[in-house]
Amino acid sequence: ETGVTQSPTHLIKTRGQQVTLRCSSQSGHNTVSWYQQALGQGPQFIFQYYREEENGRGNFPPRFSGLQFPNYSSELNVNALELDDSALYLCASSFRQLQETQYFGPGTRLLVL
Amino acid sequence: AQSVAQPEDQVNVAEGNPLTVKCTYSVSGNPYLFWYVQYPNRGLQFLLKYITGDNLVKGSYGFEAEFNKSQTSFHLKKPSALVSDSALYFCAVRDGPYNTDKLIFGTGTRLQVFP
């Protein structure tokens, strides 16, 4: 098991609501990436945070936003939830160097009704 | 744009037989390739990676992968499959060393090992 933790494990929301997902990175890691994995698909990159700033973004609308804190933990916020936002949200942490590996947490499963 | 393809949705193999899970890639520049495994209701577990060097990469749980530049492939292999290897396997490519190091994943291959 990696040292990456995520909370909550499961979440049910209704359309239009807002949600915050949390991630604690592995000790010694300073970069956090978030991915969305819809049912039956591979993970899709949402964005990455390094030194508390967004460092790259995938093809996701602005209602997906994030934060990274001084202890390198991170939050993913999604506003105005849509049914298609139902997915497994994965957080990965890594150390910012050329040959880093991303280590994933167990994920948060979000269901939007 | 970087991409990976996993041509098989499912691979079936008998326990004790060798297994291969296929992956092909398309990148500009040198590829940084990864294999991850996902068990039901779990996150992704890192198996192995190719950055540079020896074309045969050894990883966790007895898995290995062979990088083939001419065929742009990075197939995952194991000499003797176990029932416990049954899971979903993802190949991924990193978007270069100087850009945001996002991972681009394939669609996944479900490995079923029968006793």
Image (spheres, helix red, strand yellow):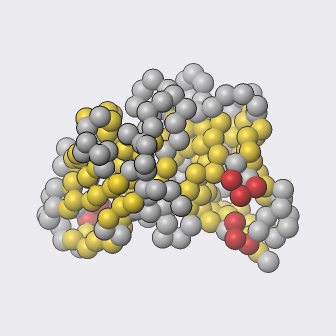
Q: Quadrant of residue A10?
A: bottom left
Residue A59 in sight: no
Number of marks = 0
| Front residue (pair A76, A15) | A76
For image coordinates 54% across by 53% down, the residue present is B107
| Residue B71 sits above or below residue B75 on the image | above
Q: Quadrant of residue A108?
A: bottom left
| Front residue (pair A66, A13) | A66
Residue B32 placement (x, y as % from top left)? 58, 33
Horizontal placement of A41 versus A86: left or right?
right
Horizontal placement of B60 versus A19: left or right?
right
- Quadrant that contains the C terminus of chain B: bottom right
Q: Quadrant of residue A84?
A: bottom left
Residue A93 in sight: yes
For image coordinates 25% across by 69% down, the residue present is A112
| Residue A100 sits above or below residue A110 on the image | above
Horizontal placement of A44 versus B52: left or right?
left
Residue B49 placement (x, y as % from top left)? 63, 41
For image coordinates 21% across by 54% down, the residue present is A77
Residue B15 placement (x, y as % from top left)? 81, 70
For image coordinates 85% across by 67% down, the residue present is B16
Residue B38 placement (x, y as % from top left)? 56, 61
